Amino acid sequence: MLRIGTIVMGAADVRRAVSFWCQALNYVPRYEVADDWAVLVPADGRAGPGLSLARSETPAQDHPGCIRICTPPTPTIRPPRWSA
């Protein structure tokens, strides 16, 4: 089973993005918010993915072509065994 741990998004103004996403999702900062990085988690302590916001100077695309998904190997995710 795949579980999403954190969603990472870029923002030109991290503090403004924190304000928006905290209200939109009922999340709170996990740590002190910096000008270039913040991690948000569900306010009520429920299980759910974190939202990390990183400062980005790259302009938003009108129609993004793809979403990058990074899945680091964990003990629960193993490649299948192929039989010969």
Image: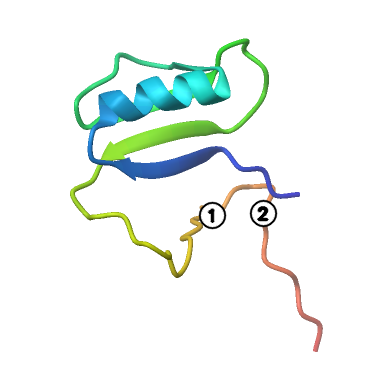
Q: Position of residue 3 (x, y in %)?
A: 67, 43
**Mark 1 near mark 2, Cβ–Cβ under 8 Å?**
yes
Tell me which numbered mark, 1 or 2, is placed earlier along the sequence. 1
Q: Identify the residue at image location x=67%, y=23%.
A: 47
Q: Identify the residue at image location x=62%, y=10%.
A: 44
Q: What is the residue that sits farthest to the front in this orientation?
A: 62
Q: Position of residue 5 (x, y in %)?
A: 57, 38
Q: What is the residue that sits farthest to the bottom in this orientation?
A: 84
Distance of mark 1 from mark 2, alpha carbons?
Answer: 9 Å
Q: Which quadrant does the C terminus fall into?
A: bottom right
Q: Position of residue 2 (x, y in %)?
A: 69, 49
Q: Label 2 belongs to which residue?
A: 77
Q: Identify the residue at image location x=34%, y=61%.
A: 61
Q: Is residue 82 left or right of residue 79?
A: right
Mark 1, residues whose alpha carbon is within 10 Å: few (<14), some, or many (≥20)? Answer: few
Q: Is residue 46 left or right of residue 53?
A: right
Q: Nearer the viewer, residue 26 or 71?
A: 26
Residue 62 falls in image quadrant: bottom left
Q: Identify the residue at image location x=58%, y=33%.
A: 49
The nearer-to-camera label among 1 and 2 is 1
Q: Label 1 belongs to which residue?
A: 71
In the image, residue 44 above or below residue 50? above
